[in-house]
Amino acid sequence: MRCPSADAVSIDLEVPFCDVDALQIVWHGHYFRYLDLACTVLMRARGLDVPQLTSLGCRMVVVESQCRHIFPLYYGDVFRVSAWVVESLNRIKIAYLIRNLTRGRRSARAHTVLVTTSPDGNLLWETPSEIRQRLRAVPRE
């Protein structure tokens, strides 16, 4: 899970002033927002944005998230967040790598785990096959 897979999607961002503390270091909680931005790009590339999910009669809920901070992001740094699917049968595990492009270092690695539910919130014990097929698809350009 340390290196992005060949079908990973990536977004490049710049640290805004509003994300840093008095030492001009990104507050740790903002990393989860960066992960969510990359997850959105990944899901859209697979045809699984909110409108597509609801048309399939499903929802996704985050049940676990973990982030290991390796090297800080500072105000003005440009960084890349890469996201890729690790597993999808009973749960959807997405791995992430945040790389500080300005300083040439890995900043964090992380993962989130999502489960699918019915529209009324009941857990689906297996990820629907249509969703699994889309998750395996090569990202659209």
Image (cartoon, helix red, strand yellow):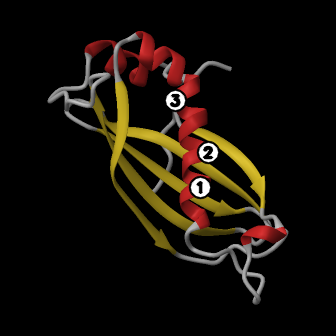
Q: Which residue is mark 1?
A: 33
Q: Amino acid at mark 1?
A: Arg
Q: Which residue is mark 2?
A: 37
How crowded pointer 2 is (Cα within 10 Å; few <14, some 14-19, many 20+) is rated as some
- The image shows residue 57 at horizontal and vertical percentages of 34, 14
- The image shows residue 115 at horizontal and vertical percentages of 28, 37
Callout 3 touching callout 2 (CB < 8 Å): no
- Residue 59 lies left or right of residue 96; in this view the side is left
SS class, disc 1? helix
Give the camera-side residue of 40 and 45: 40
Q: Residue at x 43, y 49 (%)?
A: 95
- Residue 47 lies left or right of residue 115; in this view the side is right
Q: CA distance from mark 1 to mark 2?
A: 6 Å
Of the numbered discs 1 and 3, the one sitting upstream in the chain is 1
Q: Using the rendered view, name the quadrant where residue 20 is placed.
A: bottom right
Identify whether 32 is placed above or below 73: above
Can you tell which mark lies on residue 70?
A: none
Give the camera-side residue of 107 and 6: 107
- The image shows residue 117 at horizontal and vertical percentages of 27, 29
- The image shows residue 12 at horizontal and vertical percentages of 74, 49
Q: Amino acid at mark 3?
A: Met
Q: Using the rendered view, name the quadrant where residue 14 is placed.
A: bottom right
